[in-house]
Image (tube, coloured by chain):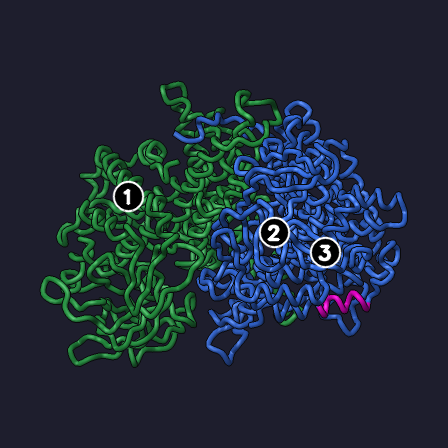
Chain colours: A blue, B green
Amino acid sequence: MTDYKVPARDMQFVLHELLDYEAHCQRLTNGEDATRDVVDAVIEEAGKFCENVLAPLNRVGDTEGCKFDNGTVTTPTGFKEAYRQYIEAGWPSMIHPVEYGGQGLPESLETIVSEMVGTANWSWGMYPGLSHGAMKTIGTHGSDEQKTTYLKHLIAGEWTGTMCLTEPHCGTDLGMLKTKAEPSADGSYAVTGTKIFISAGEHDLAENIVHIVLARLPDAPEGTKGISLFIVPKFLPEGDGIGARNNVACGSLEHKMGIHGNATCVLNFDGAKGFLIGEANRGLNCMFTFMNGARLGTAIQGLSHAELGFQKSLAYAKDRLQMRSLSGVKNPSGPADPIIVHPDVRRMLLTQKAFAEGGRMLAYYISQLVDVEYNGTDDAERAEASELLAFLTPIAKAFMTESGFESANLGMQCFGGHGYIAEWGAEQNVRDSRISTLYEGTTGIQALDLLGRKVLQSQGEMLKRFTKIIHKFCQGHKDNAALQAYIEPLAAVNKEWGELTMHIGLAAMNNADEVGAASVDYLMYSGYITQAYFWARAAAVAQAKLGGSESDFYQAKLKTATFYYQRILPRTRTLHETIKSGAANLTALDAEHFSF
Amino acid sequence: MTDYKVPARDMQFVLHELLDYEAHCQRLTNGEDATRDVVDAVIEEAGKFCENVLAPLNRVGDTEGCKFDNGTVTTPTGFKEAYRQYIEAGWPSMIHPVEYGGQGLPESLETIVSEMVGTANWSWGMYPGLSHGAMKTIGTHGSDEQKTTYLKHLIAGEWTGTMCLTEPHCGTDLGMLKTKAEPSADGSYAVTGTKIFISAGEHDLAENIVHIVLARLPDAPEGTKGISLFIVPKFLPEGDGIGARNNVACGSLEHKMGIHGNATCVLNFDGAKGFLIGEANRGLNCMFTFMNGARLGTAIQGLSHAELGFQKSLAYAKDRLQMRSLSGVKNPSGPADPIIVHPDVRRMLLTQKAFAEGGRMLAYYISQLVDVEYNGTDDAERAEASELLAFLTPIAKAFMTESGFESANLGMQCFGGHGYIAEWGAEQNVRDSRISTLYEGTTGIQALDLLGRKVLQSQGEMLKRFTKIIHKFCQGHKDNAALQAYIEPLAAVNKEWGELTMHIGLAAMNNADEVGAASVDYLMYSGYITQAYFWARAAAVAQAKLGGSESDFYQAKLKTATFYYQRILPRTRTLHETIKSGAANLTALDAEHFSF
């Protein structure tokens, strides 16, 4: 069994047939070179690296983990050599500015590579993955000098980056953070405090690590309005390379459920030299540049674990012989039938397939919105993309990671008792995926962002922007009889989405707890409808191409769409009911009476 | 934070107030001594041992795991001493026959102790837990000589037992098993073969291990009708103790996702001396004695992980300060509110609470059916109990483990990013619980047992027996206005249960795959209704006791019941729809077209 096979055909379906990727790129300021040939070459070349180099290291990373010794972190065997190959091939530079050594290609290309890297080896992928956020933050908010000093090395992959937000007593509630930054005479700052859960915070892959750190100036206001952002490098830059060691050190590694190959660090800043980035006390705003990207990156993690779980369990289900099909022997020459004959095994496989392929459609669509937001040529389109992106980011992050975790578990379940044993990798996939609903804002936090900050604070406008797109799609296909099994339920649930939102909005006017009470169910409800929209679009594309040489492929798309509509979308029925049940059933019980 | 606190008040509620445990025992042939005082003393004494001895070893077991060295297995630090205390207190003997040194008390008492042991430390609990099945099997199917030889030592806990079914190429499909048993001149058999996934298959807690092994005689028919059952002790019995070492050895330990404290062994039988138990070629029938008990034991595992997840996350949610309540500051003197103020955290806590307390009601109810089946005084009642038990066993096993795993995950989610870190124990609870939906028959296998073997093969009779009980309960409370929020939806869904079953039965007459296609969703649907019945019963008990000194406790029961009806029972809406969608959406896709 191979560790991972790039799903190139499906990636091409989404990019070229569903999203008309080449035409999209040609409308960007930086997309001229992103022709179909280039995109397909990226899939092929990055794909080979992922299949041949990264995937075989996935279990190594889990088994060995990272070693900590007196401040030094050693990554698992093979990680360093793989990183060397990765930067030699120039992958870190693909989407970054040409003036600092990048290739300046559209952001969406990174999404494609991230999916492959992440599916092959999520723990490894986090080392270069975190760098993108640091580059983006410096590129957007840094001074010219900061860009010149840091971007070249980060883009070359010689240095990597981190984001340092969380402290022991606060994660979500960053207003409580205590790390201090005191001005020094030379214009820099002395940063002191403890940060935890710093992914890739210390390692041996690159010569330097650039920490992007939230801290407070001495005179800062309390709460979130008194937080500033600093660049704190592990080694201070000197000339065209590195100089003195800075006073930041890894104090320990966390013992985690999974992603053992990635170093999750406690970082101690002890008067470390830092450089203010952006305006004082506006650090949280700058950080959101980083954060939104990280949330989309984590959405891809959901897709990655769904794809990996699917590939592993599909191979096993075709191979493992156990029991006979209830509807008649299917493998008469063998001692039993392969378990893929059993409808319930197929239910588990199809659920993973629907979430992986559906997640891919949503992720690639969103990556095009990012392209347009940053490099669109039409201001109105850019504004529209930005608004849609703000609406879809929490859905993608939370829904795709929740469905990724569900998929990883279903994949493991297909193995029966063998799924619990490490050698098959199915249980590692579950453990690795489990963090995705926690970091970069839990599912609960995404849900409050969606329902509270986005939908209700915009008076429903942000929702309407998307439901109008769905409505228009449904209208456009209302006369195509072959698609009505998708179009009709989609139109119905799309209409219900607006009504339900209105219902929550009215209830929330009387009781703010109605928002929290509805939030997670509302996010998942929104996610199922969003996926239904993409599955209907996929069905429309596939329907039009039946009869050709790839009919089997398009038939499979239609059958998976049907599965989605009949077996997954009905989850909205429960969610509609639980959302309408209101807050009282959650708030009635006194905190002291939860147990006796 | 304590590792585990016995939920004594809720256990007493279920036993005494809901199930009238003392009266139940008094109607059994062996229940005279099981008075309320005795039951409460069992909870208190076993509870102390679980809280003080077993619970602190739970993390030790996870961290250290079992050590394997050339056939020898060393259990984690403290396990052996805890086992010594456990047998000294006489716990293994409680429910076993007086003539072999047991105390002869009702089986249901073991359920109570199992819950506490399992919640405190599931991995440890499996060592004595597996022995019960071996004792039961020998007690039911063994010859008098076998009982005399083995039961005394097993009941004293000096020896432990195992069940050896699975082989590398077959778990569910036992008809394929290859282990051979060849007759020897002395009437014993030489057993040869490899068994895998043998829990507690080798360890250092007891002086001997009694393996109950499925194997084939030389002239046995193929398939499940050619399987016989053997006793294969690690050391051959001699005099009143042990003699020569038998040719069975542990070849290796599995590397598992969780339950690290329990040794999951590959056992190699190399002409090991075995003794036929029961009739030749009827081994599978004998094994079901063991298997049904093991399934109920695993159901309790679901309850245990729900309870443990709930306790850990409740303590954290009261303690962790993060953000302010949307409906106004609740902790003005602190820097933030405890996260239990947030409705979505409450949703996660209440879901765990509802599954833990609901699972307890179902598990204890089922344990009374076991009592009546084995030791009832009325033949009609015994037959009725046996039939109800056959119907409820797959529901309890699969539904309680699925909801236990969901609960463990929700508990972990309450911790945010900290949940992913080992020190809190929340992620261990998830890993430990994950096996419960796999072993002793996966959820898929339980679902086929329920829908195929039990409900449809009995022409719906087995279902009707239970829906009648629910109907009668609803009728009995139809005039109590205060209970209608529970009674009306229960009556409606109970009626729907029968209609839906009829629908599946008719579809299955044309296509046997309809059974497999509906099975898991049907099992979960049945589980939600079964739980709704118990929550309505709990509400009825609580409603009648409002106003007294424990009003807070009973109010909490009613509020949890309301939560269950408004937030959990609606899951049946989705399942009803997906079940009715039929088999075609699962069977339409050719196995070769799942990926391209």
Mark 2 residue type: Ser
User: Residue at (76%, 42%) from the top-left corner?
Assistant: A141
Q: Where is residue B226 in the image (x, y as percent from the top left)?
A: 33, 74
Residue A403: mark:
2
Residue farthest along the left direction in this orientation: B239
Instruction: Identify the residue shown where x is 33% and y is 37%.
Output: B6
The residues tagged by marks 3 and 1 sit, at their Cα atoms, a distance apart of 61 Å
Q: Mark 2 lies on which chain?
A: A
Q: Give whichever of B344, B395 is nearer the camera.
A: B344
Find the magenta span and give its range.
A37-45
| Quadrant in which the C terminus of chain A is drawn | top left
Q: Are marks 1 and 2 on the same chain?
A: no
Badge 2 or badge 3: first in the primary sequence: 3
| Mark 1 belongs to chain | B
Kindly identify which residue carries mark 3: A240
Residue A410 falls within the magenta-colored stretch: no
Q: Nearer the viewer, residue A261 or A559?
A: A261
Quarter of the image holding residue A309?
bottom right
Which is nearer the eye, A362 or A221?
Answer: A221
Cα separation between marks 2 and 3: 45 Å
Residue visible at 62% across and 27% down in the picture: B326
On the image, numbered disc 1 is attached to which residue? B53
Q: Is residue B489 left or right of residue B270?
A: right
Q: Which amino acid does label 1 sit on?
A: Val
Relative vertical location of residue A180 with respect to residue A546 in this rendering, above or below: above
- Looking at the rendered structure, the secondary structure element under dot 3 is loop
